């Protein structure tokens, strides 16, 4: 941490990025870090390739987040440092990931994250898998930098921790989550206002999508595995987008006796201007193959698979086998398959895991 602070304090211009299809931690950490560096008179560019989900658009300075670096995107970056937040691997940044990952680009790459599958890309690493959120690490960094935490920074940190811990319910909820949030409230955060924006402003379409998704819920292996599927048709029918599936898998995970919950959601090419495009990052080399149905000839499509466990199964390593990653109890990966082969494959995989 000291080396990162020393380096940043000598920087003039810093790029900060977080992962595609951002959650509250990815957006909150991004803005908090940006505001803290600005307080030290360091110029920042806040980058996120995806549309920021509507529920996080109340965050201060959210309009400063840009989806492209076109204005400055030559072969040479004019940054002293690029900070990548809440990303287990550099591809999570999306299209800009490979550019940032190139060595010899003239800037130092700083990797700040809490995923167990972090690949230690970058020149500096600040990885703490016991942190409840990247926002917890950012909080410590800001404190160490000696930057006062304004109510704007506090709102971003609070939102990051609130959302990544599932409102203090997931297994990553630690003492620090409560301590830091307590301090953030003392510094001016209004918990009701944050909750209202994050959890209280769903569109009708989002609830209709939930309805369709719940209709697909299947439970197998003595109730130990649950699975839901969301196809492109369902997004079209309800006028929803990828951001509207955030948290939806928790319905599958909440069922009594479920050890492994799976949500399969379709994604499609970025160029066609349709939702869920953000997950279409290149499917990485996989160590595992999805077992196909015998004689299957179904057409392949792109899917994002979310996995959740009750703590007895390490879903991060399952996701990593398919080129993805995450945490022990929450992970994901992208895959190209037909829907029927994918479901068949996952059920077979699950059988080996829960039995
Ligand atoms: P979700 O299922 O909500 O997309 O993601 C659950 C967790 O797994 C999050 O912490 C997320 O960052 C991580 N995750 C999801 N998809 C990927 C992926 O493709 N690669 C990596 N490295 N992590 C992922
Ligand atoms: Mn995240
Ligand atoms: Mn996170």
Image (cartoon, rainbow, N blue to C red):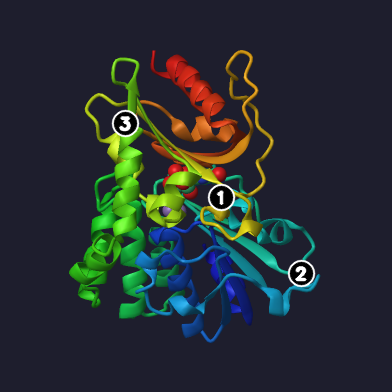
Q: Is residue 336 visible?
A: yes
Mark before the other along the chain sequence, 1 or 2: 2
Task: State the image coordinates of residue 147 (x, y, percent, origin top left).
Answer: 41, 79
Give the foreground label among 1 and 2: 1
At a point 29% along the width and 20% down the height, the residue shown is 223
Mark 1 packing: few (<14 Cα in 10 Å), some, or many (20+)? many
Earlier in the chain: of badge 3 and badge 1, it is: 1
Question: What is the secondary structure assignment of the residue under circle 2?
Answer: loop
**Whether residue 115 can be seen here:** no
Horizontal side of 201 relative to 342 (left or right) equals left
Establish whether ligand 1 lies closer than 8 Å to the Cβ of label 1: yes
Single out the residue that lies furthest toward the front.
237
Gap in angstroms between the C-alphas marked 1 and 2:
29 Å
Q: Which residue is mark 2?
A: 106
Q: Name the mark on residue 209.
A: none
Residue contact at pointers 3 and 1, CB within 8 angstroms? no
Which residue is labeled 3 in the image?
310
């Amino acid at each position: 941490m000291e080396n990162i602070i020393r380096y940043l304090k000598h920087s003039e211009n810093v790029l900060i990025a977080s992962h595609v299809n951002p959650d509250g931690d990815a957006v909150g950490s991004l803005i908090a870090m940006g505001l803290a560096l600005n307080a030290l008179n360091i110029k920042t560019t806040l980058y996120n390739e995806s549309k920021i989900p509507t529920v996080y658009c109340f965050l201060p300075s959210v309009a400063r987040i840009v989806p492209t670096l076109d204005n400055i995107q030559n072969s040479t970056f004019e940054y002293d440092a690029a900070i990548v937040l809440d990303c287990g691997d550099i591809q999570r940044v999306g299209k800009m990931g490979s550019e940032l990952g190139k060595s010899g680009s003239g800037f130092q790459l700083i990797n700040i994250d809490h995923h167990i599958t972090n690949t230690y890309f970058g020149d500096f690493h600040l990885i703490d898998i016991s942190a409840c959120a990247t926002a917890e690490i950012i909080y410590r960094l800001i404190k160490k930098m000696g930057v006062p935490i304004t109510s704007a920074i506090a709102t971003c940190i609070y939102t990051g921790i609130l959302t990544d811990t599932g409102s203090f319910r997931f297994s990553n909820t630690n003492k620090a989550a409560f301590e830091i949030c307590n301090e953030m409230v003392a510094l001016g955060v209004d918990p009701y206002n944050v909750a209202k924006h994050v959890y209280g402003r769903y569109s009708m379409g989002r609830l209709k999508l939930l309805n369709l998704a719940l209709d697909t819920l299947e439970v197998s292996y003595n109730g130990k595995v649950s699975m839901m599927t969301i196809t492109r048709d369902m997004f079209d029918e309800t006028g929803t987008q990828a951001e509207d599936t955030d948290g939806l898998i928790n319905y599958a995970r909440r069922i009594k006796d479920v050890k492994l919950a799976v949500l399969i959601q379709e994604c499609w090419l970025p160029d066609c201007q349709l939702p869920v495009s953000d997950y279409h990052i290149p499917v990485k080399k996989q160590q595992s193959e999805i077992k196909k149905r015998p004689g299957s000839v179904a057409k392949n499509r792109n899917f994002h698979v979310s996995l959740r466990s009750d703590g007895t199964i390490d879903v991060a390593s399952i996701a990593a086998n398919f080129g993805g990653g995450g945490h022990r109890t929450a992970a994901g990966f992208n895959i190209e398959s037909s829907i029927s082969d994918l479901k068949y494959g996952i059920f077979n995989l699950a059988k080996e895991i829960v039995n």
